[in-house]
Amino acid sequence: MHKQVKSNFSLTTKEAVAKYLECRRKDVEAGIIVSGRWSTIKTHLEHWLEFIGRDTKIKELERTDCEDYFHSRIKKNKKALPASQTTIANEQSTINAMMRWLFRNNEAVIDGFDFKKLPKIDKKDDTIRRSTFTPAEIDDIGVAIGRYWDRDKNKLDEKEWLSRKLACYYFLIASVTGLRTGEQRQLQWGDLVWTGRNKDGVGVPLIQIKVRAETSKVRQSREFMVRDNGYFTELRQLVTPLYATRHVGKCPVFSLDGEKAITERALLYHFGKIMELAEIADLANRNIVPYSFRHYFITQKLVHGLTHRQVADMCGTSITQIEKTYYHVDRDIMVENALADHGMDNDGIMVRLDDDD
């Protein structure tokens, strides 16, 4: 009987990650995971490569080699926001999923790393409240955006100005749609319909948004409407003249060339700069990230009277998830009702421009 002999050849970590990503790309084609999930996996493994080294041999790795991964990821980096504990936990899960796959395919001698146990998160505290912007902070962000994309005062060249404008419109639209990051980055111009309704004898412009199943985290398509405050129109006028293609409907909304959507890395970079200008405090401890715009959108819709079902339908999640995650809003609703009578207008960012802009 022929005895199987294991090869001593070892892939580098960079090669191993590429091989694993290729395998997971097939899962996207088969509809097992969405492309946004694949992009997240790629980002997680990119952070791991920066930690472990790209030329390290996979078969030389030991279970204890990632004990300091958490400490490395929470260290402050001047070029990026520090990672949250939840983000790091997700990254560690992705890394070990890859290692199990490599082990099963005889590319690794271990099936995972023994990461240090992360501090326990109290699920009953105000985690979501703290990671959500306050209305005052949203106002400050609006002022900061007006300053950040000012071409003349910042002496920006064409490329940098367009880059800032694109990122800013991404955050503005995130604040009034509540889209998930993957859904928003994969949004195409053909997914939008400009429409309107008559309210009390006055025409109200609306945008109908379609989230395709292949871009949704839950792999279910949905459609919803938001008030048209001009952000989509302004962005379309800015970017579509830059496209070489005539098939604008298939182009990503948040793209300068009509082909590649803005990267998560670029979003995080501009987000950090805007948060600094807006003087938003304690970003890391509060876990303030671009996803916080979705938290803010959901919170404001609940505070202003939408039912859990209405919000769940708009945001592509379950009523149970809304109730479990945003349990603190009931108290906020009582306070809002006591203090003022608010309408149902969008409560997203309002850009404050200088008088001479």
Image (cartoon, rainbow, N blue to C red):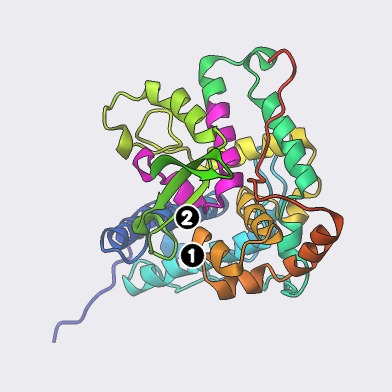
Q: Is residue 69 above or below residue 309?
A: above
Residue 94 image label: 1
Is residue 170 one of those drawn in magenta? yes
Query: Residue 131 occupies which quadrant of the picture?
Result: bottom right
- The C terminus lies in which quarter of the figure? top right
For the record, the magenta segment spans: 163-191
In this view, the residue in front, 32 or 152, is 152
- The N terminus lies in which quarter of the figure? bottom left
Q: In this view, does 102 lie above or below 22?
A: below
Please provide percent x and percent y for residue 138.
73, 42
Please provide percent x and percent y for residue 2.
15, 82
Q: Name the residue under label 2.
A: 40
Q: Is the magenta stretch mostly helix, strand or loop?
A: helix
- Residue type of the residue flagged with mark 1: Thr
Instruction: Name the secondary structure under disc 2.
Output: helix
> Is 210 situated left or right of 155 in this image?
left
Identity of the residue drawn at 79% across and 63% down: 332
Please provide percent x and percent y for residue 308.
60, 68
Within 10 Å of disc 2 (Cα), the crowding (few <14, some 14-19, many 20+) is some
Identity of the residue drawn at 70% across and 51% down: 288
> Is 40 situated left or right of 287 in this image?
left
